[in-house]
Image (tube, rainbow, N blue to C red):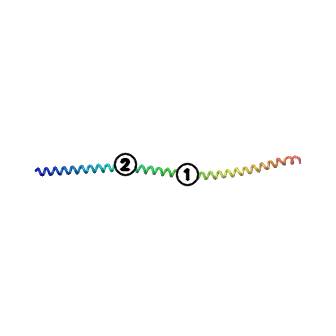
Amino acid sequence: RGDASSGLRLEVDTLRKRVRGLEEQLEGAIAAAAAARESLEASERDRIAVQSALERAEAAGAQSTELTRANADLRVVNRQMTLELEKQATELGAATLARKHAEDRLPEMLEH
């Protein structure tokens, strides 16, 4: 009976040590899982930040393209206005010249 009791105590001690070792492994695994989860969450935040930056870059690119088109349209309108102003200036110059010519001839015409 003493040997059996002593053998059972030894087995219980061995099992307790094994349980303690398994508990420590479990705690380590839980800590590792928590660290992995934090890392995953950080990676997800980084992914969201990169996605947001890409979306902003796309929007900026679209605005840049739109601005380039608007600039080109503005240059066309500007050129048309310049041509119209040049035309009006030419017409005004011709009218001024005709008026001056008429004024110069007025005394002659009044004599006849």
Which residue is located at x 89 percent, y 47 percent?
111
Q: Is residue 30 left or right of residue 10?
A: right
- Where does the image place residue 53, in percent across and percent down from the top left? 47, 50
Q: Amino acid at mark 2?
A: Glu
Q: Is residue 29 left or right of residue 68?
A: left
Instruction: Report helix, strand or loop for mark 2.
Output: helix
Q: Which residue is mark 2?
A: 38
Q: Amino acid at mark 1?
A: Ser
**Nearer-the-camera pick, 107 or 11:** 11
Residue count near mark 1 (Cα–Cα under 10 Å), binned few <14, some 14–19, many ≥20: few
- Where does the image place residue 2, in percent across and percent down from the top left? 11, 50
In this view, which residue lies farthest toward the right? 112
Q: Which residue is mark 1?
A: 64
**Nearer-the-camera pick, 70 or 5:** 5
Which residue is located at x 58 percent, y 52 percent?
68
Of the two numbered discs 2 and 1 in the rendering, the one whose residue sits closer to the viewer: 2
Residue count near mark 2 (Cα–Cα under 10 Å), binned few <14, some 14–19, many ≥20: few
Which residue is located at x 84 percent, y 47 percent?
106
